[in-house]
Image (cartoon, helix red, strand yellow):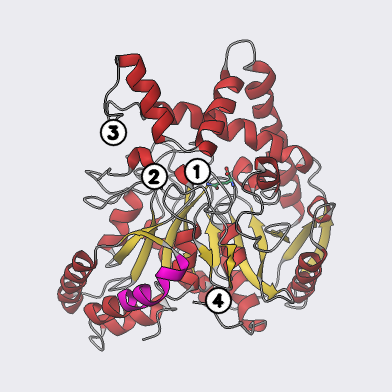
Amino acid sequence: MNLRNAHDIRDAVNSGKVSAREVAEAALKRVEAADGALGAFLTLEPELVLKRADAISRTAKEKPLPLAGVPIAIKDNICTRSLRTSCASRILDRYIPAYSATAVQRLENAGAVIIGKANCDEFAMGSSTENSAFKVTRNPYDLDRVSGGSSGGSVVAVAAGMAPLALGSDTGGSVRQPASFCNVVGLKPTYGRVSRYGLVAYASSLDCISPIANNAQDIALLLACIAGRDEHDATSATVPVPDYSEELSRPFSGMRLGIPKEFFGEGLDPEVKSIIEAGIRNAGSLGCELIEVSLPHTGYAIADYYIIAPAEASSNLARFDGVRYGYRTPSPEDLLDMYKRTRSEGFGEEVKRRIMIGTYALSSGYYEAYYGRAMRVRTLIKRDYDRAFEKVDALLSPVSPTPAFKIGEKISDPLAMYLSDIYTVTANLAGIPAMSIPCGFTRAGLPVGLQILANQFREATLLHLAKAYAEAFPLATPQLKA
Ligand code: GLN
């Protein structure tokens, strides 16, 4: 069974051609064959999956469902009722949520079948999935290389054909960068487009639950199911949700595309650069006008993001204190010792580093110099985009300065790891939608994604361009290694 296309599966299940159980069995079989080598999943409950699939088949007989029987992988920082949600952290190793995230609930209402919980960097902090407390997720195109992160498990589940859809979260690039490394499509929506209720908070003003699939049409389908106002999240937008699939059915007639010159400077791998430049020429040949634009504050983005995100993280992660959730140290001397030991033992190195940086940036005497200033720089970055979108409909850029790097290559150098987020963090700081689409392969056979960005709530623009691009320039894909 082809597990790469969600539309085909849902049509087959709705028409009764195949049962949701057959689909789920095929997905579980693929997981069994490939996941030993890849490490995409942290929690699998095959019996629950089959039970749920049977229930879907019964419902689909009565009325068609938008995601009838479609297997989906859910990143392990998104709450799933009665299903372990560890955030790839020892501190939540045995946490079983009492409720599901709104996005998950909406997917289940649409008939999707959660196939398992996907590995990620601990609390979504990282760019390689090496910060998981439990395992590394490997790249299906080269098993010695990272999948990217932090949503590595979700992306690999889709890339390796274990599920046609996945949910990840993108705070600074965590869906787009692994999508780029593994040849799939990942869309970070506008901030507020999808409810964050039930997404374990990392940096609340940046976090976005984000869809992952093999093509733009499936992203449209998934996004339509999860988007829209939710009374459980005050930051979720009241803006109406367009019919994305309907918009995609219209012919593509070109648009104005901006090329931000600051995204092509020092540090960009020459092979990635030439693949992206070819992608830009391709996009131009679709009847699009190519215009050079400037985003002058891009150079401050990494410093800005790595103040704001840790500051919010230090506050959000204060709740993991051994009292309310998850792990508690076994024999503390007193209350203070309990807090200290629980957090020292429960959090990994990178999470502790972020908590310390964030606490420092927010401390009295430093707050203005760091956090206050970072918030003003954030406004300048947002204004750069506002100006660019006066002239163009979308922007094109690399997703990541390099293809997937070797496992272990950057893990002991946090600064090098942070710098690899240079092209993705500004979309989160500005709150705009951004997408990674497959663009090409290096000589060594590693995927390279092209980033497309649009103004707030213009997801349909991105999906339209992505679909037209993929249809006009299909890629020959190398054999997967698992
Ligand atoms: N790599 C970035 C970080 O570590 C982004 C992570 C994310 O988007 N969740 O913060």
Instruction: Describe the element under mark 4 as helix, strand or loop.
Output: loop
Q: Answer whether labels 1 and 3 touch (C-beta < 8 Å).
A: no
Q: Residue furthest top?
A: 365
Say which label, 1 or 3, has the lower sequence index: 1
Q: Return the mark for residue 138.
A: none
Say which label, 1 or 4, has the lower sequence index: 1
Where does label 2 land, which residue? 199
Q: At x 74% / y 72%, what residue is drawn?
A: 279
Say which label, 2 or 1, has the lower sequence index: 2
- The nearer-to-camera label among 4 and 3 is 3
Say which label, 4 or 2, has the lower sequence index: 2
Image quadrant of residue 30? bottom left
Q: Eyeballing the image, is 335 above or below 303?
A: above
Q: Return the mark for residue 325.
A: 3
Q: Answer whether labels 2 and 1 touch (C-beta < 8 Å).
A: yes
Q: Mark 1 and ligand 1: say if the CB distance to the nearest ligand atom is below 8 Å.
A: yes
